[in-house]
Each structure stands twice: as C-alpha cells, then as structure tokens.
Amino acid sequence: MRCLILDDSKAITGLLETIVMDELGAAQALVANNVADALVLLEKKSASIDVIFCDLNLPDIDGVAFLRMLSERDFQGYIVIVSSVSHRVLKSVEHLARNHHLKLLGTIIKPISPQSVIQLLRSIGSHGEAKPQPSAKEKLTVPELVNALEEGYFECYYQPQVCAMTRNVVGFEALARLQHPKRSLIFPNDFISLMEQHNLILRLTKDQIVSVFKQWELWHQQGHCYRIAINISALLLNDLELPEFILEQIKKYGVKPKLLTLEITESCLNEDRIRALEVLSRLSMYGINLSIDDFGTGYSSIERLQSLPFNEVKIDRSFVQSAAASESERPVLDSMIGMANRLGLRVVLEGVETLEHWQMVCHSGCDSFQGYFIAKPMSVDKLEEWLADWDKMTD
C-alpha cells in the first residue's frame, strides 16, 4: 500500500505516517501540507498511490476543491476524508466525493484514533472489486479493446442476490470482466469509459446480453427461474434500436421478461431526453424490469420516480454502510426504503459486506440484497459450486 497524506498540521501527518508505516506496513507514505505540493506528488506518483488522506481545511486550496481536482485527473485510488468539521458538512462532502465518482473509503473525525485508521484501511479487503488492479495501471488502448471484442476476451461474472425474507438466492447481477491474455482480470472501471468514448459500448452490451441469456436458458433447462440484472450504459438510451434487439434475444432464448432487469445509473438519467424516455417506455412495455442503480447518489425526486417507467430502485452501498455504522444514519435508509415501498417499487440493497450489514438488511423492508458478505462476483464455473454450498447453509 502506498499513501499520500494531505494535512496542514505536521503533527497530524506525522501521526498518520506512523500508523500506516509502522502499524500497517505500508510501502510508502508521501506527505504534503498544502494542495500545491500534493498535486506535484500526484503528477509524479499518481499511478502508484492507493490511498489519499485528505484534510478539508487547508491553507491554499481547500480539500473540497482538491476532491474535484482528483476527479478531473481520474484518480483511481481510495479517498479518506480527515477533518473536524460538523457532521452535516462531512456528509455533504462525502456525497460530493461520490458524485465525482471517487472511491471514498470513509471519514476519520479529528482527533484521530489510530484504531479508526487501522480499521478503515483494513476494510479495503472487503472492497476488493473497487481496488485498482495492478494489471490496469498501464492503461488499455482502443486497439486492445477492439481485439478483445473480436477474440471474445470479455466474460460475464455473476453476483448473487438474496431474498430478504427467505435468504434464498433469487437472482444475479451480471458484470463484465476482461480476461486479457497478457494481463490479469480487468474490471469495468478500467474499460467502460474508454469504450463509451469510442463507440464500443454497444457491441460489448450486445455481447453481454447474448452471453447472459444463453446462461439463463441453461438455468431454465435445469429448473431454475433466476432473476438476472444487466447494466445498461446511459449512452445506449439514445439507441432506438436497442429495445428491438433485446426483444429478439428474449424470444430466441426464451427468457421471461419479468425475470430480466436492466439497471441504469441514476446520475446519468435526464428525463428531458425524449429518446431515452422512448427507449425506457418501450422496454417497460415488453414487461422488462427497469431499475435505478446507485439510487440516492444522483438526482432523485418523487416526480422522477413517477414520470419514468422504473419499477425497482437499487440503493447505493454507502447508505447501507452508513446506517450500520451510525444510529443517526439509519432513518435515512429506512425512509428511502419506505418511500420506494409506498410507490410500489422493488428495493434492492447493495454493499452488504459484514455480518452487521447482513443482520440489519434482513429486517430492513427491502426485497433483496447483495454484497461481498454473501459473495463476490464470480465466473459461472465457480458459481455452481457456490450455489451448492449456499443451499446447504440455508437448508
């Protein structure tokens, strides 16, 4: 682990440096007392920094502006906010960091407790999917992605979703992975944006849909009726031919539309986009479920939920983790679930990563949930073995 510590107090930087080096055995701890120095270090070491500790009250440029700069530089490591500002300000900054698509690991409130730092950094293991992969530090190129599509290097991994009432597996979220022959497994954070920029995302999405539908057909032949969830890029909501393609594949593989869910990230929605509204309406008309992914991190409103044909919300992991960590945050999660229930929407919770999360969500009023405490996304061959073990535990 390599860290960058940004704080105007040398006492604080010294304490954090001691904790990460001596207690956690970090490989390196870079120190900056202002944003200008931090940016210089980032320019030289950005690719190798795993975690940035960021104070908010700084002498030149404040920590809030620094978060924006990290987003503009597409920083892929984790962020830890370290501050003594009020609870409300911290929550606002946390929300801002997520909207910047930064990987917020958590917040440490001053005065700093060594145990809080240790506990937070050790939790990186439970966020394994989000951790930058060594194989992807050398950025992928467009020719590599085109070749990967042609050669079939993309695979579907499946993360189980569990019914909150019965604890039975009710379905899976399908997630794209790139099994590059010259690198280790590569995650979506390292290829989705590039594919969107170069008009490759439609090809990937169609390939993934076909792969998932083939797998669903096999499950159906075995007597299973699992729900399947597939992520759809917001850019594809402008493709008026997408509904026809999905319907053709549904008919070809015998997939039941009511068991198919298409997840669209909330922050990408814009109800003024007429084409997107047409695509969503037609998909819904076919009986396909539409889910707002990462619900609560974008621009939610009752009007939006009522005007667009969604029948499911997928509440972002941050709300589950905050509710488990603080009693004062639990009403926020409860109110979101209650609102969705009153609107007749299914509720899926993500980010169930500990026993405490599990115990809370089982009685939260949601319909189903997923997370690393249950299982990480896995290939089909590993999934079969996992399902057999899960059935034994729930018998």
Image: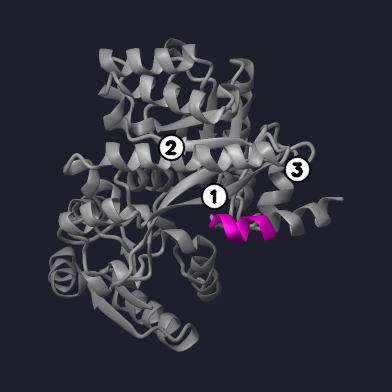
The amino acid pointed to by label 1 is: Tyr
Quarter where residue 9 is shown = bottom left
Give the image location of residue 129, x and y in percent: 46, 60
Question: Label 2, on which residue?
Answer: 209
In the structure shown, which secondary structural element does the residue marked by tag 2 occupy? helix
Q: Nearer the viewer, mark 1 or mark 3?
A: 1
**Quarter location, residue 266:** top left
Residue type for callout 3: Asn
What span is in magenta?
379-385
Viewer-closest of 202 and 270: 202
Q: CA distance from mark 2 to mark 1?
A: 13 Å
Direction from residue 152 to residue 238 in the image, left or right = left
Q: Secondary structure at mark 3?
A: loop
Residue 82 visible to the viewer: yes
Task: Assess disc 1: are there few (<14), some (14-19) or many (≥20) residues with their C-alpha within 10 Å of its C-alpha.
Answer: many
**Residue on which disc 1 sits:** 158
From this viewpoint, which residue is outermost toward the right?
A: 395
